[in-house]
Image (tube, rainbow, N blue to C red):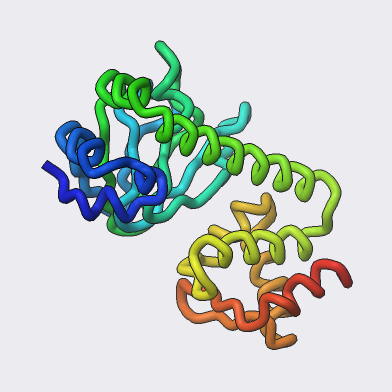
Amino acid sequence: MIDLEILRRMAIFSSLTNDELVELSRIAIGRSLMPGKFVFREEDSPQYFYVIKEGRIKSIISSSLGKELMVAFLGPGEIINPVSVFQDKCSAIGSMQAVTHTKILGFKKNEFVSFVHLNSKLSFEIIKILAERMTELCYRLRDLAGERVEQRIARILLMLSSRFGPTLIFTRQEIAEMVGTTTETAIRVLSQLKKKGIVDSLRGKIIIRDAAMLRLFIEEV
Protein backbone atom coordinates (compact mmCIF):
# COMPACT_ATOMS: atom_id res chain seq x y z
CA MET A 1 0.00 0.00 0.00
CA ILE A 2 1.31 3.47 -0.96
CA ASP A 3 2.21 5.85 1.89
CA LEU A 4 -0.70 8.24 2.51
CA GLU A 5 1.65 11.22 2.83
CA ILE A 6 2.77 10.71 -0.76
CA LEU A 7 -0.82 10.98 -1.97
CA ARG A 8 -1.70 13.83 0.39
CA ARG A 9 1.13 16.00 -0.99
CA MET A 10 -0.20 15.68 -4.54
CA ALA A 11 -2.45 18.61 -5.44
CA ILE A 12 -4.94 16.44 -7.32
CA PHE A 13 -5.65 14.39 -4.16
CA SER A 14 -5.35 17.19 -1.59
CA SER A 15 -9.14 17.57 -1.17
CA LEU A 16 -9.66 13.90 -0.23
CA THR A 17 -10.31 12.84 3.34
CA ASN A 18 -7.99 10.47 5.19
CA ASP A 19 -10.41 7.56 4.66
CA GLU A 20 -10.60 8.33 0.94
CA LEU A 21 -6.80 8.46 0.74
CA VAL A 22 -6.60 5.06 2.44
CA GLU A 23 -9.02 3.63 -0.12
CA LEU A 24 -7.04 5.21 -2.97
CA SER A 25 -3.72 3.91 -1.64
CA ARG A 26 -5.04 0.36 -1.78
CA ILE A 27 -5.42 0.51 -5.55
CA ALA A 28 -2.17 2.40 -6.25
CA ILE A 29 0.82 0.69 -7.85
CA GLY A 30 4.33 2.18 -7.91
CA ARG A 31 6.47 2.08 -11.04
CA SER A 32 10.02 3.28 -11.78
CA LEU A 33 11.26 4.40 -15.18
CA MET A 34 14.78 4.91 -16.43
CA PRO A 35 15.45 7.88 -18.80
CA GLY A 36 14.12 7.08 -22.27
CA LYS A 37 11.65 4.47 -21.06
CA PHE A 38 8.07 4.90 -22.29
CA VAL A 39 5.09 4.88 -19.94
CA PHE A 40 3.05 4.06 -23.03
CA ARG A 41 3.20 4.81 -26.74
CA GLU A 42 0.81 6.67 -28.99
CA GLU A 43 -0.77 3.55 -30.46
CA ASP A 44 -1.32 1.91 -27.06
CA SER A 45 -4.59 1.79 -25.14
CA PRO A 46 -3.60 2.84 -21.58
CA GLN A 47 -5.09 0.73 -18.82
CA TYR A 48 -3.84 2.90 -15.96
CA PHE A 49 -4.31 6.45 -14.72
CA TYR A 50 -0.84 7.78 -13.84
CA VAL A 51 0.43 10.50 -11.52
CA ILE A 52 4.10 11.51 -11.42
CA LYS A 53 5.73 11.07 -8.02
CA GLU A 54 9.30 12.07 -8.97
CA GLY A 55 11.12 13.00 -12.17
CA ARG A 56 9.97 14.35 -15.49
CA ILE A 57 7.92 13.00 -18.41
CA LYS A 58 7.65 14.41 -21.92
CA SER A 59 4.56 14.12 -24.10
CA ILE A 60 5.23 13.40 -27.79
CA ILE A 61 2.89 13.16 -30.78
CA SER A 62 3.76 12.05 -34.30
CA SER A 63 2.86 14.07 -37.38
CA SER A 64 1.39 12.52 -40.53
CA LEU A 65 4.94 12.52 -41.94
CA GLY A 66 6.27 10.59 -38.95
CA LYS A 67 8.04 13.53 -37.34
CA GLU A 68 7.93 13.60 -33.54
CA LEU A 69 6.60 16.80 -31.98
CA MET A 70 7.15 17.71 -28.34
CA VAL A 71 3.85 18.74 -26.77
CA ALA A 72 4.64 19.20 -23.08
CA PHE A 73 6.83 18.35 -20.12
CA LEU A 74 5.19 17.08 -16.93
CA GLY A 75 6.66 17.02 -13.43
CA PRO A 76 5.90 15.78 -9.90
CA GLY A 77 2.23 15.76 -8.96
CA GLU A 78 1.00 16.05 -12.54
CA ILE A 79 -1.28 13.51 -14.18
CA ILE A 80 -0.25 11.78 -17.39
CA ASN A 81 -3.29 10.47 -19.27
CA PRO A 82 -6.46 12.18 -17.97
CA VAL A 83 -8.51 11.71 -21.15
CA SER A 84 -8.02 8.16 -22.42
CA VAL A 85 -8.62 6.55 -19.04
CA PHE A 86 -12.25 7.72 -19.11
CA GLN A 87 -12.93 6.53 -22.66
CA ASP A 88 -13.57 2.99 -23.84
CA LYS A 89 -11.22 1.55 -26.45
CA CYS A 90 -9.34 4.83 -26.77
CA SER A 91 -5.77 5.00 -28.01
CA ALA A 92 -3.37 7.27 -26.17
CA ILE A 93 -3.12 10.89 -27.31
CA GLY A 94 0.62 10.83 -27.83
CA SER A 95 3.48 8.89 -26.25
CA MET A 96 4.74 9.52 -22.72
CA GLN A 97 8.49 9.08 -22.18
CA ALA A 98 10.66 9.53 -19.09
CA VAL A 99 13.27 12.27 -19.43
CA THR A 100 14.97 11.60 -16.08
CA HIS A 101 14.83 8.72 -13.62
CA THR A 102 11.13 8.87 -12.81
CA LYS A 103 8.71 7.31 -10.35
CA ILE A 104 5.00 7.22 -11.08
CA LEU A 105 1.88 5.93 -9.36
CA GLY A 106 -0.58 3.92 -11.43
CA PHE A 107 -4.24 3.24 -10.79
CA LYS A 108 -5.93 0.52 -12.84
CA LYS A 109 -8.46 2.09 -15.19
CA ASN A 110 -11.67 0.40 -14.00
CA GLU A 111 -10.77 0.77 -10.32
CA PHE A 112 -9.86 4.44 -10.66
CA VAL A 113 -13.01 5.29 -12.64
CA SER A 114 -15.13 3.60 -9.97
CA PHE A 115 -13.32 5.62 -7.28
CA VAL A 116 -13.89 8.89 -9.17
CA HIS A 117 -17.59 8.15 -9.53
CA LEU A 118 -17.85 8.05 -5.73
CA ASN A 119 -15.71 11.17 -5.16
CA SER A 120 -17.08 14.25 -6.90
CA LYS A 121 -14.28 16.42 -5.47
CA LEU A 122 -11.72 14.41 -7.41
CA SER A 123 -13.82 14.69 -10.58
CA PHE A 124 -13.74 18.47 -10.23
CA GLU A 125 -9.94 18.49 -9.78
CA ILE A 126 -9.47 16.45 -12.95
CA ILE A 127 -11.79 18.79 -14.90
CA LYS A 128 -9.76 21.79 -13.68
CA ILE A 129 -6.52 20.18 -14.85
CA LEU A 130 -8.01 19.40 -18.26
CA ALA A 131 -9.24 23.00 -18.58
CA GLU A 132 -5.79 24.38 -17.69
CA ARG A 133 -4.10 22.14 -20.24
CA MET A 134 -6.59 23.09 -22.94
CA THR A 135 -6.01 26.77 -22.24
CA GLU A 136 -2.23 26.28 -22.36
CA LEU A 137 -2.52 24.40 -25.65
CA CYS A 138 -4.65 27.16 -27.19
CA TYR A 139 -2.06 29.77 -26.20
CA ARG A 140 0.74 27.69 -27.68
CA LEU A 141 -1.17 27.27 -30.95
CA ARG A 142 -1.69 31.02 -31.05
CA ASP A 143 2.01 31.62 -30.49
CA LEU A 144 3.04 29.14 -33.18
CA ALA A 145 0.72 30.79 -35.68
CA GLY A 146 1.51 34.43 -35.11
CA GLU A 147 4.69 35.09 -33.13
CA ARG A 148 8.35 35.26 -34.01
CA VAL A 149 10.57 32.43 -32.81
CA GLU A 150 12.24 34.72 -30.24
CA GLN A 151 8.87 35.40 -28.64
CA ARG A 152 7.88 31.73 -28.67
CA ILE A 153 11.11 30.69 -26.94
CA ALA A 154 10.73 33.43 -24.32
CA ARG A 155 7.12 32.39 -23.61
CA ILE A 156 8.09 28.73 -23.26
CA LEU A 157 10.80 29.71 -20.77
CA LEU A 158 8.28 31.71 -18.74
CA MET A 159 5.75 28.87 -18.81
CA LEU A 160 8.31 26.27 -17.74
CA SER A 161 9.71 28.48 -14.96
CA SER A 162 6.20 29.02 -13.57
CA ARG A 163 5.85 25.25 -13.23
CA PHE A 164 9.36 24.07 -12.39
CA GLY A 165 11.04 27.14 -10.89
CA PRO A 166 13.79 29.42 -12.28
CA THR A 167 16.32 26.62 -12.78
CA LEU A 168 15.14 24.60 -15.76
CA ILE A 169 16.72 21.22 -16.39
CA PHE A 170 16.14 21.34 -20.12
CA THR A 171 18.51 21.15 -23.07
CA ARG A 172 18.49 23.62 -25.94
CA GLN A 173 17.24 20.82 -28.17
CA GLU A 174 14.23 20.21 -25.92
CA ILE A 175 13.38 23.92 -25.92
CA ALA A 176 13.66 23.95 -29.71
CA GLU A 177 11.34 20.95 -30.03
CA MET A 178 8.73 22.60 -27.83
CA VAL A 179 8.52 25.71 -30.01
CA GLY A 180 8.91 23.99 -33.35
CA THR A 181 12.30 25.35 -34.38
CA THR A 182 15.86 24.14 -34.87
CA THR A 183 18.39 23.61 -32.09
CA GLU A 184 20.65 26.16 -33.79
CA THR A 185 17.93 28.82 -33.60
CA ALA A 186 17.27 28.04 -29.93
CA ILE A 187 20.99 28.39 -29.19
CA ARG A 188 21.05 31.77 -30.97
CA VAL A 189 18.05 33.14 -29.06
CA LEU A 190 19.27 31.84 -25.70
CA SER A 191 22.68 33.42 -26.35
CA GLN A 192 20.91 36.69 -27.06
CA LEU A 193 18.99 36.43 -23.77
CA LYS A 194 22.19 35.54 -21.93
CA LYS A 195 23.97 38.65 -23.25
CA LYS A 196 21.10 40.76 -21.90
CA GLY A 197 21.47 39.13 -18.47
CA ILE A 198 17.98 37.65 -18.66
CA VAL A 199 19.01 33.99 -18.56
CA ASP A 200 22.10 31.96 -17.86
CA SER A 201 22.95 28.52 -19.12
CA LEU A 202 24.93 25.59 -17.86
CA ARG A 203 25.27 22.10 -19.26
CA GLY A 204 21.70 20.77 -19.49
CA LYS A 205 20.27 23.71 -17.52
CA ILE A 206 18.76 27.11 -18.26
CA ILE A 207 18.46 29.58 -15.39
CA ILE A 208 15.95 32.43 -15.52
CA ARG A 209 17.72 35.43 -13.96
CA ASP A 210 15.08 38.11 -14.62
CA ALA A 211 11.50 37.04 -15.42
CA ALA A 212 10.31 40.66 -15.67
CA MET A 213 12.93 41.41 -18.33
CA LEU A 214 11.97 38.22 -20.15
CA ARG A 215 8.35 39.46 -20.36
CA LEU A 216 9.59 42.83 -21.61
CA PHE A 217 11.71 41.06 -24.22
CA ILE A 218 8.57 39.43 -25.63
CA GLU A 219 6.91 42.81 -26.07
CA GLU A 220 9.93 44.46 -27.64
CA VAL A 221 10.95 41.82 -30.16
Residue 62: x %, y % from top left: 55, 33
Residue 133: x %, y % from top left: 59, 41
Compare residues 129 and 193 and report the one nearer the observer: 129
In the image: residue 58, left or right of residue 48: right
Vertical relation: 162 (above or below) 110: below
In the image: residue 75, left or right of residue 173: left
Question: Across the whole image, how many numbered discs are drawn on residues?
Answer: 0
Vertical relation: 36 (above or below) 187: above
In the image: residue 139, left or right of residue 80: right
Compare residues 204 and 66 and report the one nearer the observer: 204
Compare residues 12 and 167 and report the one nearer the observer: 12
Residue shown at 65% from the left, 71% from the top: 187
Residue shown at 28% from the left, 42% from the top: 17
Which image quadrant is residue 65 in? top right
Q: Quadrant of the C terminus?
A: bottom right
Residue 150: x %, y % from top left: 77, 65
Which image quadrant is residue 100 in? bottom left
In the image: residue 35, left or right of residue 90: left
Residue furthest to the right in view is 220
Vertical relation: 104 (above or below) 192: above
Q: In which quarter of the image is the N terminus?
A: top left
Residue furthest to the top in view is 89
Compare residues 86 and 137 and report the one nearer the observer: 86
Residue shown at 51% from the left, 70% from the top: 165
Residue shown at 16% from the left, 50% from the top: 3
Residue furthest to the left in view is 1
